Image (cartoon, grey):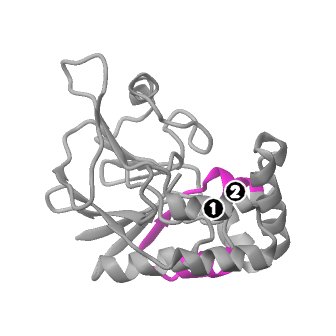
Amino acid sequence: MKTLLISDIHANLTALEAVIAAAGSFDATWCLGDLVGYGPDPNQCVERVASLPNLLCVMGNHDAATLRRIEIDAFNPEARTALVWTQQQLSEANAAFLRERPEVINVDQITLVHGSPRQPVWEYLLDTRTATANFEFFDTLYCFVGHTHLPVIYHLPDDQRLAHLIVPENTTQVTLAPRSIINPGSVGQPRDRDPRAAYALLDMDDYTCEWHRVSYDFASVQERMRQAGLPERHILRLAAGW
């Protein structure tokens, strides 16, 4: 069974549609949160994700903030501006969909969260020490996360005290080794200096995971953002992948 892994769409429908088209045929979808925030297409992105086959989807911090479950004062000024705009735009039906998303999902020896197994909605896994500490907070073989917008694997062998860091590149295929924390990267706002939308495909038959990047028309997204009055910083970063 082939599973599409997506995260951090951030209301960027053009990037999301490019990923879905590039992924081809898949049997299930695991979304690691942050469907909204930053971008100009919150309703369209929620509805498109909800339509994907055999969907499992967790809540991200921007999803939670849009629902007023996190104080927006916890975000930087530009992110707050985008969140207020998103709150004003999001339909009640799409808010209800986000409201129903759990913080943690466990399925087939895999844990799904947005941030980390220790703090599912908010914590960033940006270094090996933080990642290593988080292995104590899940007991499945693998944990899939988003939030950092960076494609990465943290692997902790049984005989090691510190997790190994692996940075997969486009079309990198890995047979996942227990125990690992895996991030597919961001669909809608990559931050690894590569502006192409990121996603991964997981083969559940042999636990092989393949990372992919796909170009999309980010200029059209930038134009919609400008028309909506969204922060210029978020507009500019789409072109540079930061």
Residue 27 x/y as whole percent: 30, 77
Q: Would residue 57 be counted in the magenta stretch?
A: yes
Residue 143 x/y as whole percent: 38, 44
Residue picked out by circle 2: 233
Residue 11 x/y as whole percent: 63, 70
Looking at the picture, tell me which residue is in the foreground, 3 or 211.
Answer: 211
Q: What residue is shown at x 41% (from left), y 26% (from top)?
A: 136
Dot 2 lies on which element? helix
Q: Residues within 10 Å of mark 1 (few under 14, many from 20)?
A: some
Circle number at residue 160 = none
Q: Which amino acid type is marked by label 2?
A: Arg
Residue picked out by circle 1: 236
* Residue 42 image-quadrant placement: bottom right
Asked whether disc 1 touches disc 2, contact meaning CB atoms under 8 Å apart, the reply is yes
Q: What residue is shown at x 73% (from left), y 79% (from top)?
A: 93
Q: Which residues are magenta?
A: 42-65
Residue 162 x/y as whole percent: 31, 20
Q: Is residue 134 above or below residue 140?
A: above
**Horizontal relation, residue 145 to residue 28: left or right:** right
Q: Would residue 158 be counted in the magenta stretch?
A: no
